[in-house]
Image (cartoon, coloured by chain):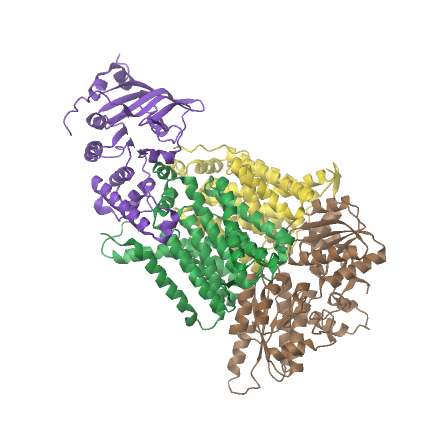
């Protein structure tokens, strides 16, 4: 019965790491601005597509990826400045619609700029699988896990050791108080969108060699990232990463042991059950509503 | 650079100022999925129709009149397809409709076209489009049944007994799956696994591991890019060596580019256009295929694919029917289409009868292999 | 200010009788074995320093917070088990410390919403505009306008509630609560944020609610001047337990209360 | 100051109905009729969704699922089991309402982002079932051969006939919504949107009211699904997925939250927009996204809100309007 288990776990973790990274991007923005950014999936798509495009234009692979991530960070910042900033104070659902509008714009732009075909990024270090613990592991999967852990560590450092990091956390807890002590909430929001763009693009770039990418892969990836950070506890960066890994493995097992057609459905069924039982997610603390 | 057919239509209208009945253009309509998930099918179809239209009009059009095609993009969305067909019939009052690109949209608009007694030549392959026969509905894409038959004859030749199938969960995949589940047992094979993957899925190791568990002699993967390329790569990553057949859905250079080394040794049925130059000179359609492939490559700087061929066939069949009928009345075109025999198109030799509005025989597909990144003809 | 309060006659059975109410949030003991009674037709105040458990008591009575133990009787009936929305029908209605006015609706609609439990017609009736619906809706409008007049907001009936100044929104919340024809109206620091003139007018209104509309009033309030002027009876809470209960004069003279409030004088 | 509130809604509805009936005669040709039919179908859903989102403040990112449930229920009843069309229609509406009733209890305890996620997840699960349950729903290549609508012996063959039917249905739905909102239930829903605490302290059963409006909006979506299936006589899972749920939310927000007329306007505008953009070929997706972003930025409370603010400004040109 568990013949394929190691393989399911490996592919689940690889896929899950990417969901976790995307969830991380959601958390960055949610923590600082309270907005769920439905264009997060597009940041991931841009990471992949820009890397492929820059590679095609002659840049070496590592440089292409770094340039792509920085460009997406700039796009994230522009998005905050042009669309989110003027919206301060409008009802929350308007912010959701604006991010949906931006995701459509980014998708349309990518289609016109990169065309409609699926493209792939060459694997960072070859495709020869490494056979270990009864499963064939691609080198690229190790890159995905390694980069995810590196980013998590960098974020932990950023939040605990840098002023900007602490300032962003302050905005997350209490915007008014943060601005009272002189933190420019606006600049923190801009920073959060930029960093979230950077993280999303990184996820896109490291995933592209495995999953290939096209102008319209953003939406489903965005939804999975959103599910990951709800699973792990909205607002908790490490919860999002863990939620992503869990989501990936669940999908993989669901596809392997039950019915591959319903793979996506399992992820969302588990999510619904969790929402009904513990809305604050696995690692989030239940918010006490003051009467 | 893309001269939109509509603009063409407008200036043609203005040009034809005089009441001269003869110079008035023949109006055809096309509903194609130029954007959306099926854009890799619709875009080459649109490009081909525009290219061939310029050629036809340069050679004097048909019945001495220029031909124009109002091309509408349904974005692979069924509502937009219905609205587009409505517009073509009621607003553009076209004589015949080319497309839609996908089976789903074709099934959705068939009724409307037939009700308005306007002939429709679909560019999709689903058998349900022409079975049971609707007098006004034709299709140019070869049925999945023919592609499956080609694979199974090859598998029979190799002496395989146990086959596993892995199909994509969209219109194309489902149609293939139904025919596979019918013909595999009928062909005396044993179906060991029936797995599915999503059009946007990015990892099929779970399905392949499960299939490997049933130790089949060969696996048939039925889908269109990018899924099958992921399957091919996963197969190499898992170190699986069981022979893998692909469907004609990936019979394009794009697939080889995406799958990279993982495409090595794969087998798939394809229209002859894919290997136009490599065809033996005795082949009747070679000259036509090579000409089409070359001009498409020059104009659109992209390798040709069988999908573009559907655009070619639907346009040329319509023009041929207008010439045979000597009029652009929808009813006359419908009747003329039904009488077309031995028309050498890109998809194959078309012969329509009142009972068969698909018009293609088994010769539509030949078996191809992939060696060192290029196609190899494996045998008729 | 009304004349000094006459000493109330022998106390009739209390309208509200809270016995040994205990409320615990995790480790915090908000209320421990607290008894609290409100006599019918009286204005009874519940006072005490911050954190004494006043608002918790109010929330417990209105079902916003579950009782850990003890019981609450209204007019003899046990209401401890009722969900919050059933307590209004039982006759207990409250206002809130920080304003909870329905800003998206007009002033009149706010007060009509107050009569939710009393307007009797089915959803189908409201869709088909049956005569029964028309009568009930007109009656509801009538009663709502009457409450608005009572608090002096009659001519602002059609203004959006969000446009009213703070003081008037306080009055609106009162009118809305009155519209529910409660047996007991609980006011949660109604004087918060009001200037002295507005507080005085509030005092008259509270007396009027009790004397003219015959609604018993429970008042949680910090403004001692208002409490002493308006209340027939006062209960003092200290660390979640009643310290003393009696007439305003008795409470002012009670050493325990002074100690609790003003701390030990050396 | 006694304004007869009774006749006002009915009067507006009759005027609206007359306008709808007149529209076909103003159209250059019949092609635009099918846009009006699809527009009115979307309007029925949008009005229902606005009761849920605009009035009661409960966001739903999965309403296309109820639209699909209605469509597939009637398709399966009438085509696979050969039941008469009215039975299929009843089945469609009831199935959508029943599923909503079951899903409502656990879902509506949630708030804000969690509620959005739960409804989104529910919508995706249902669209996957449409796609995978091949022998029931015909799977990804869709469900063919749904009979044209036939009621009381009359089959609605022509688009014009179907449009007139839609005009009747949409007017009744609008009247239902207007009347409901101008009643005890409407006040309770708008109250709990602002403050659930205050509403429940006044006797409003929050859970019951949320479930009622959730089920009502689902039933209306189901009704639209039924009418869509019998209009197109073909349905495919792709039309009931997440992207259509998003379009519905945009119709409501663009039209104007808590405004029945706003959602009707939003629905027709967003149905006609892509058709009007067809001339732009590839870049219509860009134009659609841009219009979305700009409208939300410059008309935060939607078309209806903007018009209301404009009219209030015009009425008080003299008095400085404190709340801009």
Please state the horizontal and vertical placement of residue B185, each as a whole percent of the image: 78, 55
Question: Chain drawn brown, letter?
Answer: B
Image quarter in which the C terminus of chain B is found: bottom right
Pick the front one: D105 or B368? D105
Whether residue B252 can be seen here: yes
On screen, residue B47 versus residue D245, left or right, reads right
In the displayed structure, D120 sits above or below B267; it is above
Residue pictured at 55% horizontal, 76% vertical? B8
On screen, residue C50 versus residue D66, left or right, reads left
Pick the front one: A131 or C21? C21
Residue furthest top in the image: C266
Chain C in the picture: what colour? Answer: purple
In the displayed structure, C71 sits above or below D255; it is above
On screen, residue D263 versus residue B86, left or right, reads left
Question: Chain drawn green, letter?
Answer: D
Please state the horizontal and vertical placement of residue A216, each as a whole percent of the image: 58, 54
Chain A in the picture: what colour? Answer: yellow
Pick the front one: A60 or D95? D95
């Amino acid at each position: 019965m568990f013949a394929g288990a190691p393989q399911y776990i490996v592919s689940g973790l690889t896929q899950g790491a990417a969901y976790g990274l995307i969830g991380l991007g959601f958390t960055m923005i949610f923590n600082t601005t309270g907005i769920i950014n439905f264009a997060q999936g597009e940041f991931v798509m841009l990471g992949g597509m820009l890397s492929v495009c820059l590679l095609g234009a002659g840049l070496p692979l590592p440089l292409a990826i770094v340039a792509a991530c920085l460009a997406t960070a700039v796009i994230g910042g522009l998005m905050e400045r042009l669309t989110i900033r003027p919206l301060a104070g409008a009802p929350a659902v308007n912010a959701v619609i604006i991010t949906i509008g931006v995701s459509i714009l980014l998708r349309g732009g990518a289609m016109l700029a990169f065309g409609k075909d699926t493209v792939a990024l060459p694997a960072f270090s070859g495709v020869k699988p490494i056979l270990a613990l009864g499963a064939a592991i691609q080198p690229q999967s190790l890159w995905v896990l390694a980069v995810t852990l590196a980013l998590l560590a960098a974020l932990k450092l950023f939040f605990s050791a840098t002023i900007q990091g602490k300032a962003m956390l302050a905005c997350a807890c209490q915007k008014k108080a943060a601005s009272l002590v002189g933190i420019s909430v606006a600049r923190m929001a801009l920073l959060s969108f930029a960093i979230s763009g950077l993280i999303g693009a990184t996820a896109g770039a490291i995933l592209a060699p495995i999953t290939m990418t096209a102008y319209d892969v953003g939406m489903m990836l965005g939804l999975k990232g959103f599910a990951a950070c709800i699973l792990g506890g909205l607002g908790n960066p490490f919860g999002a990463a863990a939620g992503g890994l869990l989501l990936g493995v669940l999908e993989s097992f669901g596809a392997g042991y039950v019915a591959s057609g319903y793979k996506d459905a399992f992820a969302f069924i588990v999510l619904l059950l969790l929402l009904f039982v513990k809305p604050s997610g696995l690692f989030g603390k239940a918010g006490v509503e003051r009467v | 650079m893309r001269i939109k057919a509509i603009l063409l239509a407008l200036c043609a209208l203005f040009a034809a100022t005089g009441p001269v009945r003869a110079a008035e253009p023949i109006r055809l309509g096309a509903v194609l999925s130029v954007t959306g998930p099926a854009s890799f099918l619709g875009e080459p179809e649109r490009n081909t129709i525009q290219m061939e239209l310029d050629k036809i009009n340069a050679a004097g059009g048909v019945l001495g009149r220029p031909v124009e095609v109002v091309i509408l993009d349904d974005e692979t969305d069924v509502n937009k397809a219905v609205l587009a067909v409505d517009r073509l019939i009621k607003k553009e009052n076209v004589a015949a409709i080319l497309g839609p690109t996908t089976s789903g949209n074709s099934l959705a608009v068939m009724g409307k076209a037939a009700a308005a007694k306007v002939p429709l030549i679909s560019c999709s392959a689903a058998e349900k489009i022409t079975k049971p026969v609707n007098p006004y509905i034709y299709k140019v894409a070869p049925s999945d049944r023919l592609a499956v038959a080609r694979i199974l004859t090859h598998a029979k030749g190799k002496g395989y007994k146990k086959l596993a199938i892995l199909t994509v969960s969209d219109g194309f995949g489902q149609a293939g799956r139904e025919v596979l589940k019918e013909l595999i047992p009928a062909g005396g094979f044993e179906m060991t696994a029936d797995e599915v993957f999503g059009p946007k899925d990015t990892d099929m190791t779970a399905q392949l591991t499960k299939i490997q568990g049933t130790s089949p002699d060969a696996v048939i993967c039925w889908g269109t890019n990018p899924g099958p390329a992921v399957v091919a790569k996963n197969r190499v990553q898992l170190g699986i060596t069981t022979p893998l057949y692909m469907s004609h859905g990936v019979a394009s250079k794009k697939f080889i580019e995406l799958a990279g080394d993982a495409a090595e040794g794969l087998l798939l049925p394809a229209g002859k256009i894919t290997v136009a130059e490599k065809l033996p000179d005795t082949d009747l359609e070679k000259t036509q295929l090579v000409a089409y492939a070359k001009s498409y490559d020059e104009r659109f700087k992209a390798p040709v694919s069988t999908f573009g061929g559907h655009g070619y066939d639907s346009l040329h069949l319509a023009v041929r029917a207008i010439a045979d009928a000597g009029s652009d009345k929808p009813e006359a075109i419908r009747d003329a289409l039904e009488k077309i025999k031995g028309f050498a198109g890109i998809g194959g030799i078309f012969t329509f009868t009142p009972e068969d509005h698909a018009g293609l025989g088994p010769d539509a597909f030949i078996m191809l292999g992939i060696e060192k990144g290029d196609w190899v003809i494996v045998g008729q | 200010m009304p004349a000094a309060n006459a000493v109330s006659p022998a106390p009739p059975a209390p309208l509200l009788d809270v016995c040994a109410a205990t409320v615990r949030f995790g480790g915090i003991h908000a209320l421990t074995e607290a008894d609290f009674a409100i006599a019918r037709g009286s204005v009874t105040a519940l006072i005490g320093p911050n954190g004494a458990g006043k608002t918790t008591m109010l929330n417990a009575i209105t079902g916003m917070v579950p009782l850990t133990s003890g019981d609450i009787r209204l007019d003899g009936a046990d209401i401890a088990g009722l969900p919050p929305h059933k307590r209004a029908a039982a006759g207990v209605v409250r206002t809130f410390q920080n304003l909870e006015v329905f800003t998206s609706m007009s002033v009149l609609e706010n007060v009509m919403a107050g009569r939710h439990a009393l307007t009797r017609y089915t959803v189908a009736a409201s869709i088909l505009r049956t005569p029964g619906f028309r009568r009930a809706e007109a009656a509801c409008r009538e009663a709502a306008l009457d409450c608005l007049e009572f608090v002096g907001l009659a001519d602002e009936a059609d203004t959006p509630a969000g446009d009213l100044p703070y003081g008037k929104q306080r009055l609106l919340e009162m009118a809305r609560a009155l519209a529910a024809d409660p047996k007991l109206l609980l006011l949660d620091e109604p004087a918060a944020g009001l200037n002295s003139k507005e507080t005085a007018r509030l005092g008259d209104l509270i007396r009027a609610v009790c004397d003219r509309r015959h609604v018993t009033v429970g008042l949680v309030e910090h403004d001692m001047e208002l409490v002493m002027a308006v209340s027939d009876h006062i209960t003092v809470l200290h660390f979640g337990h009643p310290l003393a209960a009696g007439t305003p004069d008795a409470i002012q003279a009670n050493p325990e209360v002074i100690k609790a409030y003003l701390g030990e004088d050396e | 100051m006694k304004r007869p509130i009774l006749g006002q809604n009915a009067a507006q509805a009759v005027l609206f109905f007359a306008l709808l009936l007149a529209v076909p005669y103003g159209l250059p040709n019949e092609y635009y009729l099918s846009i009006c039919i699809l527009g009115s179908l979307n309007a029925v859903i949008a009005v229902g969704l606005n009761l849920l989102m605009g009035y009661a403040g409960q966001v739903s990112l999965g309403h296309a699922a109820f639209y699909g449930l209605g469509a597939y229920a009637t398709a399966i009843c009438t085509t696979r089991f050969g039941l008469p069309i009215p039975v299929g229609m009843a089945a469609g509406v009831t199935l959508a309402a029943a599923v909503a009733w079951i899903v409502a209890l656990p879902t509506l305890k949630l708030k804000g982002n969690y509620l959005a996620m739960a409804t989104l997840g529910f919508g995706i699960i249902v669209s996957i079932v449409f796609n995978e349950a091949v022998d029931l729903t015909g799977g990804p290549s869709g469900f063919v051969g749904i009979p044209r609508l036939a009621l009381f012996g009359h089959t609605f063959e022509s688009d014009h006939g179907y449009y007139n039917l839609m005009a009747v249905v949409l007017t009744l739905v609008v009247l239902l919504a207007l009347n409901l909102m101008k009643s005890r239930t409407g006040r309770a829903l708008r109250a709990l949107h602002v403050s659930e605490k205050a509403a429940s302290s006044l006797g409003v059963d929050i859970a019951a009211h949320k479930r009622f409006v959730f089920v009502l909006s689902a039933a209306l979506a189901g009704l639209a699904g039924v009418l869509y299936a019998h209009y197109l006589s073909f349905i495919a899972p792709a039309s009931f997925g997440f992207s259509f749920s998003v379009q519905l939310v945009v119709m409501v927000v663009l039209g104007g939250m808590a405004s029945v007329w706003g959602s009707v306007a939003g629905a027709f505008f967003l149905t006609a927009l892509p058709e009007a953009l067809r001339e732009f070929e590839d870049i219509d997706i860009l134009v659609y996204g841009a219009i979305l972003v700009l409208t939300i930025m410059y008309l935060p409370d939607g078309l209806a809100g903007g018009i209301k603010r404009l009219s209030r400004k015009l009425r008080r040109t003299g008095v400085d309007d404190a709340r801009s």
